[in-house]
Structures are given as C-alpha cells and as structure tokens.
Image (cartoon, rainbow, N blue to C red):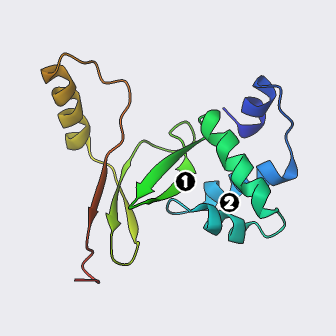
Amino acid sequence: MSIEKILENHKLRVTKPRQAIFETLHGASHPLSEVEIAAATPTVDPVTVYRTIELFLKLEVVVGVAHGWKQRYELASMFRPHHHHILCSECGQVEEIQSEKLEQFIRLLGNDHGFKVTSHTFEIAGICARCR
C-alpha cells in the first residue's frame, strides 16, 4: 500500500510536507529522531514534522524505536521487511537485526505462555566494538 492510498483511505490530504517526511524516512538507513527528520526536510516547518510523525504513528505508517529515553522513528513493516535493532548506548549507532531464530524464539515464548503472538518489538542495547 502507498502513503497516498493510506492518507486517502483516512480522508486526509496528500501534502508536500507529508510526502517529504515519508520520503526522508523511506531513504533512511536507520531510525531517525524528530530532530533528524526536521534537519533532513528543511523545507518543512519543524512543528509540521512533529505533527506528521504523530499522524503517521496513529495511521501505523511509522513505528517508534526506543533508544534510551529518546524515541526514533522508521517506516512500519508494510513498507520494509520486519526487523529489530541493536543500539549502542555510547555513540547512538543503530543496526538492524533480521533473525529467523529470534522470530521462532518469540513465537515459542508466546506459546509457552498461552499466547499467539500477533506483533512484537525487540531492541538490544549495548556498547559497539568502536566504543569499547
């Protein structure tokens, strides 16, 4: 599904700022903070960036990735493959993790507790090799 279709389905306008923010997130190699998104879209007012991120969260276009007490954002799994992150608590480096073993473990954990897992997030914090 496209961002245009999602906005139209919710009777919302497809605006240039919304498209610019979506494109910034689409081109990002890692989750971005609101400040980083605003810096990458200088033609968009920072307040509009914050409001658009809130809207995209409600529409499930983006997901939040906790990094310490800060929140970063990336496109949801409808726009990119499902994955998790490993985060350096020293320098802020973020790497994606795609692991079928982890997905199997999460399903097994759910089963052990009588749950059918329908969604999940999994983030690992540590210190990268460069910072050690």
Circle 2: residue type: Thr
User: Foreground: 117 or 97?
Assistant: 117
Residue 47 image-quadrant placement: bottom right
The spot of residue 34 in percent (x, y) is 62, 61
Instruction: Residue lying at the far left in this picture: please name it.
Output: 112
Q: Amino acid at mark 1?
A: Tyr
Q: Dot 2: what SS? A: helix
Q: Position of residue 8 (x, y in %)?
A: 81, 28
SS of the residue under disc 1: strand
- The N terminus: image quadrant: top right
The residue lying at 33 percent from left, 77 percent from top is 90
Q: Residue 89, percent across and down?
A: 33, 71
Kindly identify which numbered label has been placed on residue 24. Answer: 2
Residue carrying label 1: 73
| 21 displayed left or right of 109 | right
Q: Quadrant of the C terminus?
A: bottom left
